[in-house]
Image: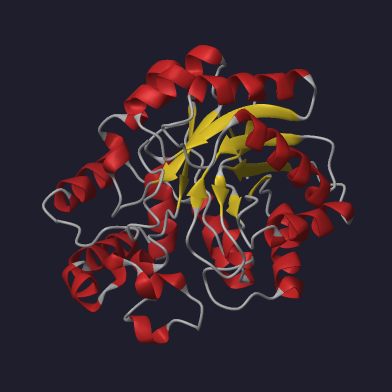
Amino acid sequence: MKTRLLANGLEVSSMGLGCMGMSEFYGQRNDKESLEVLARAVDLGITLFDSADMYGPHHNEELLGTFLRATTAPVKIASKFGINRKPGQYARTIDNTPEYARQCLEGSLQRLGVDHIDLYYIHRVNPDHPIEETVGEMSRMIEEGKISHIGLCEVNASTIRRAHAVYPMTAIQTEYSIWTRDVEEEILPTCEELGIGFVPYSPLGRGYLTGTVINTQQFDSGDFRAGLPRFSEEALSHNQKIRDLVIASADQVNCSPAQFCIAWLLAKGEHIVPIPGTKRLRYLEENAAAADVTLSPADLQSFDAKLASLKVYGDRYTEEGMKGVNA
């Protein structure tokens, strides 16, 4: 797989692997199968694995730690702090104080079994905590060799500029897909102006854009999509036109809908690195093959023109899930 440069010298595979679903939110977990997926991802040339301390909570970093102890592959680990939640609960508080950042880093290093984290994100921002103080503390973590690069998640353009003025940001991670395009207005232009990489999560619309999600009755127990506004029966019905456009467009260029979604993102900028998540080998291999799909300027122009006329129905998170978003 080809590589891409996010910023500040961090070179990774053109797409990474989102590991959240290996621990929770998308039904029952299976550590054995997840470890097989991680190993196969390395075989396919994927070098960026994305985690967070709140996935599990803590289980996801522990799972990655198990994998890292069994491999010598030169993978890059991204993790995050800032969302505090109890096991089995969706409710969360947002804490990005310097003290909490330091506490979380030490825990993540121990669970991952590494001496440094390649890309450390502030997962959500609490506007009551000055971003400058948090980034200042993270810059000291870099001086100590405990992290290599700093990133932000789900922030507004003003916060990006304030953080970047303290220490150069390497990546901004925000949801971005064919049915979540808010970042195109201000966030992507800001990243381009400042030379910051962009890491889109949920590039497949949490599976809906692939055509595999018909209704919420098919979700396993514990799948949080069943409670998301965008996955209500009414919203799914309205959004079917977007899904159908993706399926038809993928057919025209001889790829799967999932591959089209990823290729569409890759074509949006050379410093964009999507991180489709999966815990299934067949989906991993399908997603990785998107790196070989090329959409021509004419393909993009035609698709985007049709997409512009379609409205997306339903918020992407509940009110609880929106805590710290666009802060």
Chosen colour scheme: secondary structure
**Residue 9: horizontal and vertical position, in percent?**
64, 22
Count of labels in the image = 0
Picture quarter with the C terminus: top left
Q: Can you name the residue that lies furthest to the top here?
A: 165
Q: Quadrant of residue 95?
A: top right
> Which sits in the foreground, 29 or 208?
29
Residue occupying the point 49% across, 64% down: 90
Q: Quadrant of residue 67?
A: bottom right
Q: In this view, does 247 lie to the left or right of 121?
A: left
**Residue 51: horizontal and vertical position, in percent?**
63, 51
**Residue 202: horizontal and vertical position, in percent?**
44, 55
Name above or below for residue 111 compared with residue 237. above
Picture quarter with the N terminus: top right
Q: Can you name the residue that lies furthest to the bottom here?
A: 217
**Residue 320: horizontal and vertical position, in percent?**
38, 57
> Which sits in the foreground, 69 or 287?
69
Q: Quadrant of residue 70?
A: bottom right
Residue occupying the point 37% across, 37% down: 268
Name above or below for residue 25 compared with residue 151. below
Q: Is residue 88 left or right of residue 236?
A: right
Q: Can you name the residue that lies furthest to the left here?
A: 309
Q: In this view, does 102 lie to the left or right of 227?
A: right
Residue occupying the point 79% across, 34% down: 116
Q: Can residue 9 be seen in this view?
A: no
